[in-house]
Image: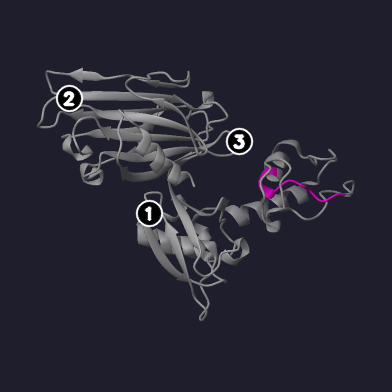
Amino acid sequence: MKCYTCSEEKLSKEFFLHPLSGQCNHVPDRCLKCLTKTLRKEKSCPKCKSSVPSSTIQKIIQTFDALFSTGPSMTSTLTAPTAGGLWTITVSTLDGTSNQFKTSPTAGVDYLKKEISVRLKEKQTKLRLMFGAKELRNNTTLQEYGVRDGSSLQVLVLMMEDFSGEAYKQLHFDLNWGFPDAGADYLDGTCLLFSNQNHSYSADYERQRPIPAVTHTGDIIDMQTFRGHHGIDVVLSQIPQSITHLYFVLSAWNSPFVSKYPNPSVSLASVDRPNVNLCSLTVSEAGNVQAIIMCRVERMEEGKWSVQKVAKGCSGNAKNYAAIIQAIQQLQQ
């Protein structure tokens, strides 16, 4: 079923399948999420504007909370696989790492997320499980989405979600590095903006303001301390609607590997909450790669954004982004 408000295809259980009042002669065509948001404000049917009884509104809100709550009580609703007929499901992360899990048609999405969280050592509430372009939601089963034996899923590890609030208007990317043994050199910090599969803009040392919403400091070099600095500011509310993803990338200019630069420090934070680091990198994670795709910021619904860990190494640098763009396009598939 397709929601009239958010235009997303959703499961039938994500809709309230009864008229909202005695005056309504139709079934709501808004999903529970959109319908709940409307009823909290207007107390009337969004289609025919008839008044909705408080008892009905309360029932809808309770139904929504029961289906989509992500609090601690979720563990009590996990559906474990039944014996016999187990499937092998492959789950991949954005960096290309794959893990296999044994499960069954009756296994709940919550149960699989719990297994993934143990394997990846990530909190279950930070995991977003995808099958193709469809997100697998809590309190549903794998079978409801057409998942079968041998299916491949993708798991996104969210660093921080929902930047639509007052505190999350602007992001700041901060990079500091030391010169490698070979002498003065640049560890480039870049923001690559994509419209789905298509690379649209680059913000780097040379293109310091490709669009008004994104600003790069350019090279800031201190020859006294033998260190360099890059900063990137992003105003999320001003990002063009055509842009769906922002990728933050590190790349070595002359040195062969990112790990050749001593004592690098890198962070991504909200300007209003600078102490909450949304994405960081250690030297051990950088490894022997020319570039590393640190994380991506993805546009969600209704002006919201999510930050997802990538940590994928690849070739390419600020001299020629072709290999980096190709690696990102593979992530976008």
Could you classify mark 1 by the number of other residues whose Cα lies within 10 Å: few (under 14), some (14-19), or many (20 or more)? some
Q: Is mark 2 on a helix, strand or loop?
A: strand
Q: What residue type is labelled 2?
A: Arg
Q: What residue type is labelled 1?
A: Glu
Which label belongs to residue 109? none
Which label belongs to residue 122? 1
Please tell me in which quadrant of the rendered image residue 281 appears.
top left
Instruction: Determine the CA span between mark 3 and mark 2.
Output: 41 Å
Instruction: Determine the CA span between mark 2 and mark 1.
Output: 33 Å
Please tell me in which quadrant of the rendered image residue 321 appears.
top left
- Which comes before the other along the chain, label 2 or label 1? 1
- Which comes before the other along the chain, label 3 or label 2? 2
Characterize the magenta stretch by its predominant secondary structure: loop
Q: In this view, does 12 lie to the left or right of 228?
A: right
In the picture of the structure, the residue carrying the numbered disc 3 is 302
Q: Is mark 3 on a helix, strand or loop?
A: loop
Q: Is residue 311 left or right of residue 176?
A: right
Q: Does residue 225 appear in the picture of this structure? A: yes
Residue sitting nearer the eye, 153 or 141? 153
**Where's residue 2, x and y in %?**
71, 48
State which mark lies toward you, 2 or 1: 2
- Which comes before the other along the chain, label 3 or label 1? 1
Q: Does residue 277 appear in the picture of this structure? A: no
Q: Give the range drawn in magenta.
A: 26-34
Residue sitting nearer the eye, 271 or 155? 155
In the picture of the structure, the residue carrying the numbered disc 2 is 227
Q: Do the residues labelled 2 and 1 touch (CB within 8 Å)?
A: no
Q: Is mark 1 on a helix, strand or loop?
A: loop
**Where's residue 127, x and y in %?**
46, 52
